[in-house]
Image (cartoon, rainbow, N blue to C red):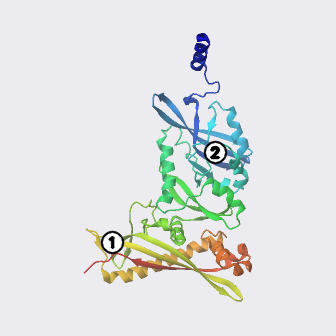
Amino acid sequence: MKKAALAIVLLLFLTGCWDRLPLRSLNNIDIVGVDYDEKSKKVLLNFVITKLKRAGQGNGEPISETTQLFGPSVVEAVGQGQYKDRGPFIGINTRIFLISERFAAHNPVRELAFLLDTPYTTINSPIVVFDEKDSTFFKQISGSRKENTKLLNDFVLSLETYGMISNVTMMHFLLSKEDPLEDFALPLLKHVNSRIELDGALLFRQSTSTGIKLSQEQVRTLMLLIGDGSLRQKLRGFSSKLNDGRQPRTGHLNDIDYAFFTKKVSLKIIVTPNSNALPNITLRVKMNINATELGEEVHALKSEYVRNMEKELSKHLNEMAVETIKKLQDANSDVLGIGKELKAFYPDLWRSLEWRTDYPRMLIEPKFEVKILNTEIK
């Protein structure tokens, strides 16, 4: 009896895991990049993988490497990975999906829809567009420490955190194919002097790329038009330079330099039906801001300047909004959700419209109302 018990105990200690995988053999995919080669008609798949360069008890030294796979489709390119000497690829921790403009123009949902049914795949990660002309994008990451991939991930997430542009997850992107009113703008990233910058946004209509892009300034205007409450405390201004929201943007009015940031932005869509024509749409945007006069010292605005400042800012934002709305209508991309508003609250009017035909021809007018909250107290 004692011998039997001893044998059972020994089995517990001596039996190993037949399917175990050493930590240094794991290849966790941090970033997935997908491009399309027009000449060969093949998909180019870039995996930025993280593996342990050196393992240690309780810690390790991660390093990032890139692997390129080719195939007639994304699925077939992924399948080529099993023939590589890198070892198995694990996609459960994928941080970002990057697609090129070329790939976006070739029915990306058809190529990527398999991800919805693929186990151990992170499809709640954001999807962004990268400049495929930048051939060094993935090469600069290869061989680097994992911090570089983390910095890229943090930057993409900060775009939404600081109100620059809303992120779209891979799941949202794929499921939008089934929603005829689901239009959105994907962030467009560019490599500049070894750093990643937001270069604008690519407009999509029901998961299909329109090929039309918004500039940086138009993206900022779009976010104000959306009127999302998450914009509170995000810094805004006239500057055309990219700003991640951490520093105040500045402007110039009547020989006064100033900076301001938004406290609250709200949007109200006003619909005016026309009996024999398309309805008129007014986008009423109320924007509360804090503004300061700049000089050798930072001052609150004097009360006599406030009214003029509010008027000039409203005028400037209206002009920018007109240009942005025209881009949206040219792309037939209803990122502002006007169609959803009409369908929900004006069902009779909605039924009389051929939305994709009528939307680009509608009169859509912005009306910004800027209110400065802080003034000099006398």
The three-letter code of the residue at mark 1 reads Thr
Quadrant position of the C terminus in the picture:
bottom left
Q: Residue 292 carries which label?
A: 1
The percent coordinates of residue 110 (x first, y second) are: 73, 53
Occupied quadrant, residue 178: bottom right
Name, please, the residue furthest toward the front. Answer: 1
Occupied quadrant, residue 179: bottom right
The percent coordinates of residue 48 (x first, y second) are: 57, 41
Mark 2 to mark 1: distance in Å? 48 Å
- Give the side of residue 66 with respect to residue 178, left or right: left
Q: Look at 38% across and 61% down and name the residue there.
A: 247
Q: Residue 121 carries which label?
A: 2
Asked if residue 202 is positioned above or below residue 303 in the image, the reply reads above
| Category of crowding for the residue at label 1, using alpha-carbon neighbours closer than 10 angstroms: few (below 14), some (14–19), many (at least 20) | many
Quadrant position of the N terminus in the picture:
top right
The percent coordinates of residue 19 (x first, y second) are: 64, 27
> Which of these two is toward me, 31 or 202?
31
Q: Of helix, strand and loop, which one carries label 1? A: strand
